[in-house]
Image: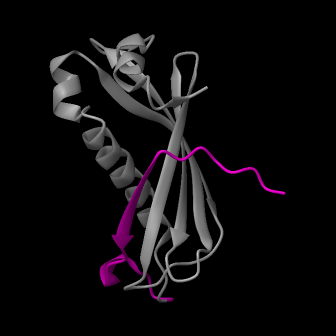
Amino acid sequence: MATEKPYFYEIEIKVRDYECDAQGIVNNANYQHYFEHARHEFLEHAGCSFGKMREKGIEPVVARIEINYKNSLRGGELFVCKLYMQREGIRFVFYQDIFRVSDGALCAEAKVTTVCTKDGKIDKGDDFATLLEEFISK
């Protein structure tokens, strides 16, 4: 029996035709855009826009991305990107899954590791953690 993931945010997105390759499926690089868009929208939803964080000296940056592709999306299809996050020391890890709306198929899953910088140097991320403490899975 599969364990339910502790998603706390989701966004529905429609595939645009120009995101598809010659095979008529979404080009692999566009999944990274989808995952990034979902993270940015989540941060806005949580009241932590990049502009507001920058004003506080908080600069979260992607350090590593792992994507597993499962089922292809095609032009015009709707999908939902769901996410949750965990803190691992100075790293904040976003776990994100994309599901096709029409049949619920898992299309891609990602593990996005971020760190925070301050004055150009890696920071412990305590300020970022404080902003998002209600969302960080234990």
Q: In this picture, is 98 found above or below 24?
A: above
- Image-quadrant location for residue 20: bottom left
Q: In this picture, is 4 found above or below 135?
A: below
Tell me what residue is drawn at x 23 percent, y 33 percent.
50
Task: Look at the image and tell me in which quarter the N terminus lies.
Answer: bottom right
User: Front-most of 15 and 30?
Assistant: 15
Q: In this picture, is 19 found above or below 55?
A: below
Tell me what residue is drawn at x 57 percent, y 78 percent.
72
Give the residues in magenta.
Answer: 1-23
Tell me what residue is drawn at x 48 percent, y 45 percent.
8
Answer left or right for 10 relative to 52: right
Question: Magenta stretch containing residue 14, yes or no?
Answer: yes
What secondary structure do most residues of the magenta stretch adopt?
loop
User: Front-most of 26 and 138?
Assistant: 138
Q: Position of residue 42 (x, y in %)?
A: 34, 44
Q: Position of residue 99 (x, y in %)?
A: 54, 68
Answer left or right for 30 relative to 40: right
Q: Position of residue 71 (x, y in %)?
A: 62, 75
Task: Look at the image and tell me in which quarter the C terminus lies.
Answer: top right
User: Front-most of 80 and 73?
Assistant: 80
Question: Magenta stretch containing residue 80, yes or no?
Answer: no
Q: Position of residue 14 (x, y in %)?
A: 35, 75
Q: In this picture, is 137 found above or below 98?
A: above
Answer left or right for 119 relative to 106: left
